[in-house]
Amino acid sequence: MVAHVVHTDQMKQSLDAKKAFNWRWFLKAAALCTLIYVACMYVYFCPLVDQGICNKIIFHPEKKDGPWTVRSVAGHEYQDVFFKSKNGSKLHGWYFPVKDAKYTFLCMHGNGGNLAYRTPEMELLLGTGSSVLMFDYQGYGMSEGKPTLSGVVDDAQAAYNFLVREKHVDPQHLILFGESLGTSVAGNLSRRVECAGIVLQCPIASIRRRACEIVGPVCIYPDFLWPSAGFDNVGIFREKHAPLLLISGTLDPMIPVAHGDDLFRQASQPKTYVRIEGVGHTGDPRLTTAPEYARALNAFLQRL
């Protein structure tokens, strides 16, 4: 009888020990699973790894609709032109060849709509007596494909190649123009190509910085985990660059004027900055019609 009781106690102690051991194992396994899950989520949402999420958030393309009845801007008729991006997608643009023009503007627009919504910018640039090419990234307007952070600079490179190779524009007479998101595209393109100057309207200091301002948690991703290193215009223009003109509206709700302020402060020479008081983002008619904008643009061309 005693032996049986002892044996029963031993079994109970053994079962208790196993239960304690299993509980510790469960906690360790749960912690490991949690760590793996967090790591997987970190990688999954990484802008460099899963660009699909970033692309859907950043780009808001519209196909051919809206004000496509326009056949001329500022008295200049455009040519519908087509060329292919690096991945083979056919891109579309409006090309305004101005007789005896000294300069040609290659325009990179923002993340919404399509080129047909940029007639105020075209009118402003044509008003300087320059030729203009405004094109649509993949997925916009009449351009094939889908827009991606990794692809928009390739699209801009294709437009540049079209002007230089097909239209025989001298790179020394070619000016890169970007507005809003397009300022990041123009900045990155300027590292690849030769040009006479760079004009950035409503400039972004970096896409990563703006993303962090809007969605704070994405700040956990450092620059190198973003496509094209976060499209860091500050870093680009700290280095040697063509003459740079920055235009910002002090009441811009989309890209705070602080982006332009910081970009100008940290950029190397030659550089010029015009802050237009009381105006907003691209689309605000007071921006492109501001007298100081036209004066700054013409003075910039004269200095070139």
Image (cartoon, rainbow, N blue to C red):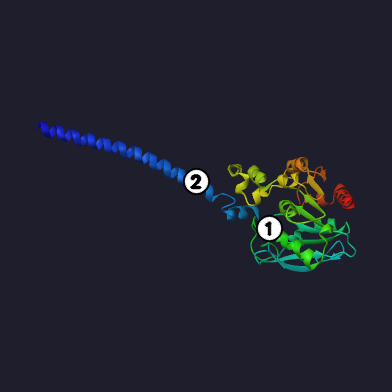
At x 70%, y 61%, the residue is 155
Amino acid type, label 2: Ala
Please indicate, yes or no, whether residue 132 appears anywhere in the rendered image: yes
Outermost left residue: 1
- Left or right position of 24 against 46: left
Viewport quadrant of the N terminus: top left
Q: Which residue is more in the foreground, 127 or 272?
A: 272
The residues tagged by marks 2 and 1 sit, at their Cα atoms, a distance apart of 29 Å
Please determine whether, in this image, residue 136 is positioned above or below residue 28.
below
Which disc number belongs to residue 152? 1
Where does the image place residue 47, in percent across and percent down from the top left?
59, 50
- Left or right position of 267 against 211: right
Which disc number belongs to residue 270? none
Q: Earlier in the sequence, mark 2 or mark 1?
A: 2
Instruction: Assess disc 1: are there few (<14), some (14-19) or many (≥20) residues with their C-alpha within 10 Å of its C-alpha.
Output: many
Determine the image quadrant of residue 4: top left
Q: Marks 1 and 2: in contact by CB < 8 Å?
A: no
At x 80%, y 52%, the residue is 198
Which disc number belongs to residue 39? 2
Where does the image place residue 77, in percent across and percent down from the top left?
84, 67
Where does the image place residue 239, in percent across and percent down from the top left?
75, 46
Q: Secondary structure at mark 2?
A: helix
Determine the image quadrant of residue 150: bottom right
Where does the image place residue 226, in percent across and percent down from the top left?
62, 49
Amino acid type, label 1: Val
At x 59%, y 54%, the residue is 51
